[in-house]
Image (tube, rainbow, N blue to C red):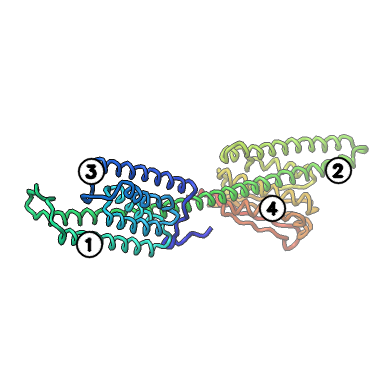
Amino acid sequence: MEEPVWNEWRRPGPTPAQRRRDVGIAVIVVLCAVEATVLINSMGAFAFGRAPGLREQLAWVLALSVPLVVRRRYPLAVMLVVSAVFIAAQWRQVGDNLVPSAVLFLAIFTVGAWEQNRLIARWSRIGVIVVMFLWLGFGLVRALIGPKTAGFKDAAGPLDPLLASVLYGLEFNIFFFLFAYVVGEMAWTAARRRAQLEFQAEELRRSQERNTAGAIAAERLRIARDLHDVVAHHVSVMGIQAGAARRVLDSDPAMARDALQTVEQTARTAINELRGLLGVLRADAQEDLRAAPGLDDLPELFENARAAGLEVSHGVYGAPREVPSGVALSAYRVVQEALTNVVKHADAQHVDVRMRFLDSALELEITDDGRGPSSSTDAGFGLVGMRERLAVHGGSLEAGPRRDAGYLVRASLPTEEKA
């Protein structure tokens, strides 16, 4: 999902719930306007000193309030209609001016908060505000040239009453229209920021889903490698021993019995390792590593290979030391896979396993005297698994036919923990 250009962002239209809310607000404004008009007429406290009949006043306040029903759907049109009706109502000198002013404020605010075209939103509001100040100036001029009233008979301040009245009206209207403009801009900015947060939250959710899917795929691949190593090795040994038992069952029952015993032990070992792998599904990684086989379990692999008819020689070079459990597990699996390939594919008589403890690495070298290149036949997945295991630790793998005969597998695993 491509991130929008936020400076060019357009606010989506109102939701059905917001449209219903606009209807409710319009109904409340109409009720307040009707009540205020009735009270003003009952008191005789008209905003302009006099007013038309009550029915006409009610018609004016209804004409002002009803457009609010669609204020968020058509903000610009509502502001223009309300502004025109506001001036016309003041020209007719309706009794109440409070609710009409509140309706005008709401209309100007809505354009700032909801108009899609921001250029039109800005200049249309500025235009309406200018017109309103021109109308205010016209009203002041009309008051100056009109008949004098006794409206300032109780004035006692230091300023001229008329000047004070003009300044008061001017300052009030500046604050009124500026506040409507600024609050509308703030509402638009808040909506845009909310959209940004929602977009970022959605991107974060998608990223988490991708990370989770990647982690699941990596874990499945790891389990698949382990299953391949365990099953391929032990089943190969079991197959060879079972075949040997079948061939000597009649001629040498004792040898057949030993071969079948090896099959039984190998099967139990395979089951135990499979149980350990399945434990990954309900145990954390560190617990799994502690339970996993390591360098101390290599002699069992050698015995299994010998039981399959191979001569196995094993040498350790350098000062043996404790290595990280993950490195030990990977080293064990590399030796296991290499021996499995020798048993299944190499037709070899002898295999040599060497383990070197270098200053900052553990090196494994497995060589055999088998058929060379044919040793890798059908072993592609195992070699890929070895490379993946080593890559996790920053290690390397060299695998291929030897110059004279047989096959070579050399693995290097760093033994220093990453900082």
Residue 18 placement (x, y as % from top left): 45, 47
Query: In the shown orientation, is residue 177 left or right of residue 310?
Result: left
* Marks 3 and 4, the one that precedes in the sequence: 3
Circle 1 — which element?
helix
Task: Give the residue at the far right of this rendering.
Answer: 250
CB of mark 2 within 8 Å of CB of mark 4? Answer: no
Q: Residue flagged by tag 1: what amino acid is it?
A: Phe
Is 296 drawn above or below residue 199 in the view shown?
Answer: above
Residue 159 placement (x, y as % from top left): 8, 54
Q: Residues within 10 Å of mark 4 (few under 14, many from 20)?
A: many
Residue 217 placement (x, y as % from top left): 63, 49
Q: Which residue is mark 1?
A: 138
Circle 2 — which element?
helix
Q: Which residue is mark 3?
A: 44
Circle 4 — which element?
strand
The residue located at (74%, 54%) in the rendering is: 379
Query: In the shown orientation, is residue 88 left or right of residue 117?
Result: left
The answer to which of 412 and 24 lies nearer the viewer is 24
Q: Residues within 10 Å of mark 2 (few under 14, many from 20)?
A: some
Residue 279 showing in the rendered view: yes
Circle 3 — which element?
loop
Mark-to-mark CA distance, 3 and 4:
109 Å
Mark-to-mark CA distance, 3 and 1:
25 Å
Q: Which residue is mark 2?
A: 243
Residue 186 placement (x, y as % from top left): 35, 53
The residue located at (69%, 39%) in the rendering is: 274
